[in-house]
């Protein structure tokens, strides 16, 4: 099924009925192949043009740590950790980030990472992974920013 408000060549839904409960669920899938061939060069083209975060964002939660398996279950409100001004600066830095090759990003499992959970008004969630030195991962694509506000928020959230 297509998802209202999203491009039919990008976001699709699959209806599944649980046999044990009889409840139906819609699983949402983003076509990563279409993203890789869409000419995206900045994170804004993904987040705003494809995922409509600029007009559909409700609130942001985050997780910081090294164990990404528990991130979804251990979220905190971003607004409780950083000011609204810092949140806006971070989102601007992310939106302005440039697409890079996955070869340019060196992923160290021991480094702390931040997962931003962008909770949308349409009840969907977009996960954005932030790593040290301005690296960003979202929906199969890697981005990089040198914006100082990214580092400021990253350092604030990873400080123990």
Image (cartoon, rainbow, N blue to C red):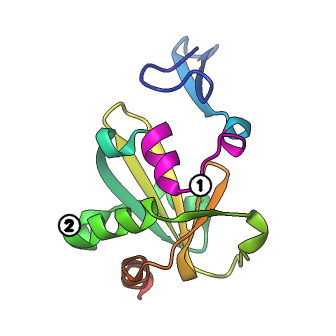
Q: Quadrant of residue 141?
A: bottom right
Q: Total of numbered circles in the picture? A: 2
Q: Pick whichever, 124 or 66, lies toward us.
A: 124
Q: Quadrant of residue 144?
A: bottom right
State the image coordinates of residue 139 (x, y, percent, origin top left).
Answer: 61, 48
Q: Residue at x 24, y 64 (%)?
A: 79
Q: Residues within 10 Å of mark 2 (few under 14, many from 20)?
A: few
Which residue is farthest left?
84
Q: Which mark is residue 81?
A: none
39 in the magenta segment: yes
Q: Measure the C-alpha gap from mark 1 to mark 2.
A: 27 Å
Whether residue 142 is situated above or below residue 152 in the rendered picture = above
Name the element at disc 2: helix
State the image coordinates of residue 71 (x, y, percent, origin top left).
Answer: 52, 60
Whether residue 61 is situated above or below residue 33 in the rendered picture = below
Q: Pick whichever, 4 or 18, lies toward us.
A: 4
Q: Is residue 42 left or right of residue 35?
A: left
Q: Is residue 5 left or right of residue 45?
A: left
Q: Residue at x 50, y 79 (%)?
A: 146
Q: Pick whichever, 41 or 143, lies toward us.
A: 41
* Image: magenta residue range: 35-51
Name the element at disc 1: loop
Q: Which mark is residue 84?
A: 2
Query: What residue is shown with label 1?
Result: 41
41 in the magenta segment: yes
State the image coordinates of residue 59 (x, y, percent, origin top left).
Answer: 29, 50
| Residue 98 visible from this viewpoint | yes
């Amino acid at each position: 099924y297509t998802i209202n408000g999203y491009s039919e060549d990008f976001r699709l839904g699959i209806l599944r009925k649980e046999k044990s409960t009889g409840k139906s669920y819609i699983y949402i899938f983003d076509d990563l192949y279409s993203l890789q061939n869409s000419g995206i060069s900045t994170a804004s083209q993904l987040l705003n043009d494809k995922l409509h975060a600029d007009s559909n964002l409700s609130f942001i939660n985050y997780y910081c740590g090294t164990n990404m398996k528990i991130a979804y279950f251990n979220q905190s409100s971003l607004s409780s950790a950083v000011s609204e001004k810092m949140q806006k600066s971070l989102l601007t830095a992310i939106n302005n980030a440039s697409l890079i090759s996955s070869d340019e990003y060196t992923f160290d499992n021991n480094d702390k990472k931040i997962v931003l959970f962008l909770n949308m008004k349409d009840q969907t969630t977009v996960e954005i992974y932030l790593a040290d030195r301005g690296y960003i991962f979202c929906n199969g694509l890697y981005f990089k920013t040198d914006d100082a506000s990214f580092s400021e928020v990253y350092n604030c959230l990873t400080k123990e």
